[in-house]
């Protein structure tokens, strides 16, 4: 499975992004906008059948696109998502916390 097999949908009043494959929600990331310049990621869930398919990375890429478009920085309080940020220095332009490696 690659990113082209997945569609992304914003739900929950604009605070959740769903990853959908073949009509099934296979993962989501929950976030809130903080002030005018930040997004806080608090939770991510991936269907256990899809944990080995980089769904979480694709969801992070979607939230990063939103942050860049809205000129916001991202704070992650989700340890799982924070780990993804730590593994991808190309996201440093939007990452606000956990900058140490």
Image (tube, rainbow, N blue to C red):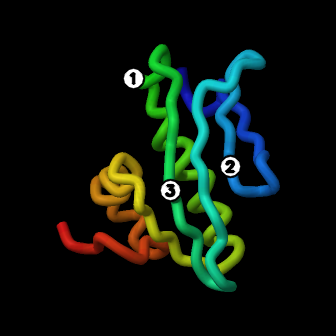
Q: State the image quarter where residue 48 is shown.
A: top left
The outermost residue toward the right is 13
Q: Position of residue 5 (x, y in %)?
A: 65, 24
Q: Is residue 34 above or below residue 63?
A: below
Residue beneath disc 2: 16
Q: Is residue 83 above or below residue 5?
A: below
Q: Earlier in the sequence, mark 3 or mark 1?
A: 3
23 relative position to 33: left or right: right
Instruction: Look at the numbered disc 3 and give the secondary structure of its residue.
Output: strand
Q: Position of residue 34 (x, y in %)?
A: 62, 77
Q: Residue at x 36, y 46 (%)?
A: 80
* CB under 8 Å between discs 3 and 2: no
Q: Earlier in the sequence, mark 1 or mark 2?
A: 2
* CB under 8 Å between discs 1 and 2: no
Q: How much space separates mark 3 and mark 1, taking CA atoms?
A: 21 Å
In the depicted view, which residue is nearer to us: 93 or 27? 27
Q: Where's the C terminus, which quadrant?
A: bottom left
Q: How much space separates mark 3 and mark 2, taking CA atoms?
A: 10 Å
Q: Residue at x 77, y 48 (%)?
A: 12
Disc 2 residue crowd, few under 14, some 14–19, many 20+, Cα 10 Å = some
Q: Position of residue 85 (x, y in %)?
A: 36, 58
Q: Is residue 44 above or below residue 100?
A: above
In the depicted view, which residue is nearer to us: 81 or 101? 81
Disc 1 residue crowd, few under 14, some 14–19, many 20+, Cα 10 Å = few
Residue beneath disc 3: 42
Q: Is residue 2 above or below residue 99?
A: above
Q: Residue at x 58, y 78 (%)?
A: 38
Numbered disc total: 3
**Viewer-nearest of discs 1 and 2:** 2
Instruction: Look at the numbered disc 1 and give the secondary structure of its residue.
Output: loop
The circle on residue 52 is: 1
């Amino acid at each position: 499975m690659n990113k082209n097999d997945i569609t992304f949908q914003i739900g929950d009043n604009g605070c959740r992004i769903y990853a959908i494959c073949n009509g099934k929600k296979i993962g989501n990331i929950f976030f809130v906008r903080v002030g005018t310049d930040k997004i806080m990621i608090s939770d991510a869930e991936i269907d256990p059948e899809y944990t080995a398919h980089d769904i979480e990375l694709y969801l992070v890429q979607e939230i990063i696109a939103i942050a860049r478009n809205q000129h916001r920085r991202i704070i992650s309080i989700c340890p799982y998502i924070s780990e993804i940020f730590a593994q991808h220095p190309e996201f440093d332009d939007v990452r606000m916390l956990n900058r140490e490696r």
